[in-house]
Amino acid sequence: MSSGESIRRSNLSHVVMLLHEQGPLSRSQLAQKTGLNRSTIASLVAELGAHKVVVEAEPNVNLSVGRPSTVAMPNPECLALAVTPERDALTVGIVAMNGQVLIRHRHEWENPQPASETVSIMCDLLDGLGSYLSEDAQVLGVGIVVPGLVNSRDHSVRFAPRLGWVNEPIARMLSTATGYCCYAGNDASLGACAEHRFGAGRGVSDLLYLHGGTGGGIGGGVIHNGSSLMGVAGYAGELGDVGPFGQNFAELAEPRWQLEHLALLISNAVNVLNPARVILGGFLASLMSARPGVLDRLVSSTALSASIENVEIVPAELGEDVQLIGGAELVFRRLIDDPMLLPHQHGDERASRPMDL
């Protein structure tokens, strides 16, 4: 690839990323944010439009002064499917760019199923989403959100104790069954990515996301310098079961002992990672809100004074949508990497590349 072609593709990627994260932008706004001239932006937007990645529309004229200029936005027909198997349920959804969850369906079960059975259920539920798709919809792939260790190179599940899965090639299995490009990732790492782009972590380059999942497990995801910290194989941030956490902590007489364990966990992580913000999702957000101010005081008393300076501890903002949004990011990341090659066909070789969120 020539240097000129490489630069063009990089510029296309930059434009799509801006529209994905920030929503509709005029050509002048895109020029300002990218540092490119207006004619270059016009050419890039036109090319993205021809490939049906971006559309242009008239802005709200009531909010404009003078002649309104068109705004570019992600094509609303570019969609990702997301699947989140958990201990008590399997949830599927349709997600558009900008982190918009359009449809979600939850299928409850008494116990997790073996991977092969789960794939069969996933297929049925994903098929059921077809009635919500228009004829123009471009389904770019499926993101699988797993509460366990997921290898970022081949998207296989190495160990997911709450599902009973060990060494399961879940992405390949679902891809074979559906014909879609499928990608898998750890739930907390994907939650960190989702909150960083669309939730409580927007505008923060270094953060720690802690998620309290079904059954009391604590997962962690790290954003460092604006990108996900994955480790050599994608296992970074996995904290496992730390302390006697439980989902029904609100029913106890006294949650302070849980706050003390959580404070110690956060303090150790802050000392190691030095984030600007700690975001608590799942039942951890409710645990913090049960005793306002207590967690901050406990963390301040246990973390290194220099490390805890200016660190904010805040609840997650995306609620129950966080995992579906995170799963969709596995798919949209491929589109952003190369907007000219929509990864919607089975067998796309990029499905085997390491995740880079």
Image (spheres, rainbow, N blue to C red):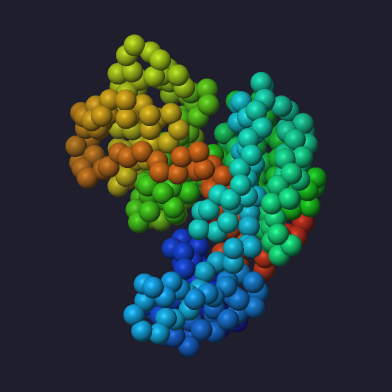
Q: Is residue 75 left or right of residue 319?
A: right
Q: Is residue 272 visible?
A: no
| Residue 293 coordinates in the image, percent (x, y) | 23, 30
> Which quadrant of the view contains residue 108?
top right
| Residue 247 coordinates in the image, percent (x, y) | 47, 22
The structure residue drawn at horizontal position 40% and vertical position 41%, both measured from the top left corner, is 316
| Residue 75 coordinates in the image, percent (x, y) | 59, 67
**Residue nearest the viewer, comparing 274 with 323:** 323
**Residue nearest the viewer, comparing 228 with 330:** 330
| Residue 43 coordinates in the image, percent (x, y) | 54, 84
- Residue 13, compared with residue 288, is above or below; it is below
The structure residue drawn at horizontal position 44% and vertical position 81%, both measured from the top left corner, is 69
> Which quadrant of the view contains residue 25?
bottom left
**Going by the picture, which residue comes out furthest to the bottom?**
39
Q: Is residue 305 visible?
A: yes
The structure residue drawn at horizontal position 61% and vertical position 26%, both measured from the top left corner, is 87
**Going by the picture, which residue comes out furthest to the front?**
62
Q: Quadrant of the N terminus?
A: bottom right
> Which quadrant of the view contains residue 265?
top left
**Residue nearest the viewer, comparing 287 with 261:** 287
The structure residue drawn at horizontal position 44% and vertical position 52%, both measured from the top left corner, is 198
Q: Is residue 268 left or right of residue 162?
A: left
Q: Is residue 198 left or right of residue 169?
A: left
Report how many numbered discs are placed on residues in the image.
0
- Residue 224, compared with residue 239, is above or below; it is below
